[in-house]
Amino acid sequence: MPSARIVARRGPDRPPETMMTAAAMVAEFDDVAGWTADAVRDLGDRYAIPAACRGSASPIALAWLAEACELSRGMRLLDVGAGVGGPAAWAAERFGVRPVLLEPMPAACRAASTLFGLPVVLADGRWIPLRTASVDAAWCLGVLCTVEEKASLLREIHRVLVPGGALGLIVVVARGKRLRRLPDGNHFPAQAELDALLGDAGFEVVEQIDRPAEVPRSWTRRAQEVAAIVEARHSASQAYALAARQTSRLADLLDDGELSMQLIHATNLGSTA
Ligand SMILES: C[S@@+](CC[C@H](N)C(=O)[O-])C[C@H]1O[C@@H](n2cnc3c(N)ncnc32)[C@H](O)[C@@H]1O
């Protein structure tokens, strides 16, 4: 089992409870994270990456982002809102990058650390405890819609990324004007709002595509086997019910075309607008 290394850092003047207030989000991103790591430990290492990708990242989506960002061996990749760490572990395994994971949920940090042995910083992405221009590339996958202060988050990523450095994003974009039955605590940007946020934070969008639909069956099967164990063990709990409701609301909105999942490659222009 890889060794755990978690560095705990928080924003300078905010208590941790203001970072994420919706109980359903804590259930989804913290409780389920810990349960997922437990189930992976029982099933084996082959299950870890598919089960630990919780931002709807598939190997095809990750490969698109990695190629777009020109990831290569030895590059320092910061994954903001890294969750259980699947995408960063995938990038380390396939592209030889040196990831640093940043994640505000303690159980998710522990899960990522024990599953993959990668360095994890317990912190809020609006206050990243890293030096200016200290990472070569950054990913932020499925995170923006869970953060109300998107501008602060993007500006912090811009600060720690080297000028000219690549940012890979997965963003759930609102297509309709008035979305019904939103997952608790989520704020989905419209495309124009997202464009303005990225531009104001000092990023230039190089390319954007719809998330590729194809996912290899072997990947889906492993993720589903882990999810089935989590369900069997925890379906009676309130946290499980809350997290499941979040997932099904998001799936319904995506199925109805009210939301769409976008992959974005942007670069740090070196100065903010
Ligand atoms: C949908 S999950 C995606 C996890 C991971 N990026 C992946 O693709 O598997 C969203 C993640 O964003 C994290 N998050 C929420 N608010 C955040 C913030 N202010 N700063 C950094 N991460 C945040 C959540 O804790 C959660 O792990």
Image: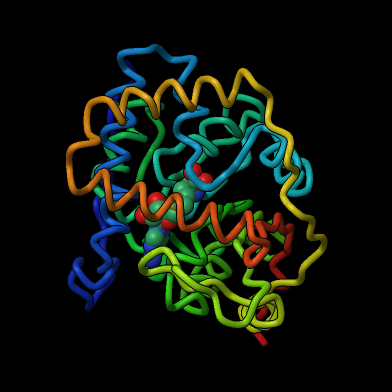
Q: How many marks?
A: 0
Identify which residue is drawn at 68% across, 72% down: 175
Eyeballing the image, is 201 above or below 1?
below
Does the rendering let one see residue 243? yes
Quarter holding the N terminus is top left
Residue 220 percent across, percent down from the top left:
57, 26
Q: Nearer the viewer, residue 258 or 167?
A: 258
Quarter holding the C terminus is bottom right
Identify which residue is drawn at 32% across, 17% down: 41
Eyeballing the image, is 215 above or below 13?
above
Q: Nearer the viewer, residue 235 or 61?
A: 235
Identify which residue is drawn at 52% across, 79% down: 151
In the drawing, does residue 105 fall left or right of residue 186? left
In this figure, which colouring scheme has been used for the structure? rainbow
Does the rendering let one see residue 128? no
Residue 142 percent across, percent down from the top left:
53, 55
Identify which residue is drawn at 24% across, 36% down: 235
Residue 70 percent across, percent down from the top left:
76, 44
In the drawing, does residue 56 fall left or right of residue 213? left
Quadrant containing ligand 1: bottom left
Eyeballing the image, is 116 above or below 132?
above
Q: Quadrant of residue 182?
A: bottom left
Eyeballing the image, is 174 above or below 94?
below
Q: Nearer the viewer, residue 240 or 84?
A: 240
Q: Residue furthest right?
A: 207
